Image (cartoon, helix red, strand yellow):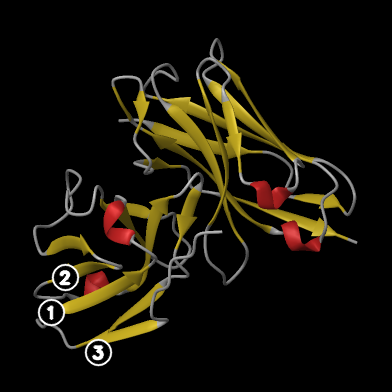
Amino acid sequence: SYELTQPPSVSVSPGQTARITCSGDKLGDKYVCWYQQKPGRSPVLVMYQDSKRPSGIPARFSGSNSGNTATLTISGTQAVDEADYYCQAWDRIAVFGGGTKLTVL
Amino acid sequence: QVQLQESGPGLVKSSETVSLNCTVSGGSIGGFYWTWIRQPPGKGLEWIGYIDDRGYTKYNGSLKSRAAISVDTSENHFSLRLNSVTAADTAVYYCARSPTFGVVIEHYFDYWGQGILGAVSS
């Protein structure tokens, strides 16, 4: 079965750039999306089709996908961005990465 | 604004069947795909399966045919039945929507319910 691998945690200082990676075999051939989940809340879509932002998602969020790695980039990270982030792709079923806890120190 | 709301029993006994409902408001069930996703406490997300408004379904094989999703377009809701549950099925269950481009499903989830905890007791 297809697997997506994310780092368990990423730390960033406020105002700096956070990069969260998601790796999978030939992932660049698939569309990747990203969800943000805060404690006790439902996931929120923050990026779809690799690099498209849904309405209402700040422009500091961007995405890319090439080769075996997709990346969610948060520029000028704010304290409000602290959350768990999950990547997701489709390989006959929806597959999620294990999640990355973003800490804004 | 589309809203999804899960409902159902919070606790079931091991080996029984859990039935969950997702009511869609602010929009029609028609023209979209409707999904169930679960998240065990402290863990990641697992896709269970989806259904479209015609009743076409697709499931995660890891559930070994224990899941069944149905839709009631007249009531604007869809449902999940998961049989032979064990403690491993204890999770927050989310319903979610996948948009379509024409008749083709877009494989991401743009609206989510608030989630409902489904706990299995021994």
* Camera-side residue of B114 and A19: A19
Contact (CB < 8 A) between labels 3 and 1?
no
Q: Residue at x 80, y 62 (%)?
A: B87
Q: Nearer the viewer, mark 2 or mark 3?
A: 2
Q: Which residue is mark 1?
A: A17
Contact (CB < 8 A) between labels 1 and 2?
yes
Which numbered disc covers residue A74? 2
| Lower position in the chain sequence, tag 1 or tag 2 | 1
From this view, report whether residue A23 is shown above or below residue B79. Answer: below
Amino acid carrying mark 1 in the image: Thr
Asked if badge 2 and badge 3 are on a common chain, one would say yes
Judged from this view, the residue extending furthest toward the top is B74
Q: Quadrant of the N terminus of chain A?
A: bottom right
Residue B5 locus on image (x, y percent): 51, 36
Categorize mark 1 by other alpha carbons within 10 Å: few (<14), some (14-19), many (20+): some
Q: Which residue is mark 3?
A: A105
Give the left or right position of residue B59, taking residue B53 as reference.
right
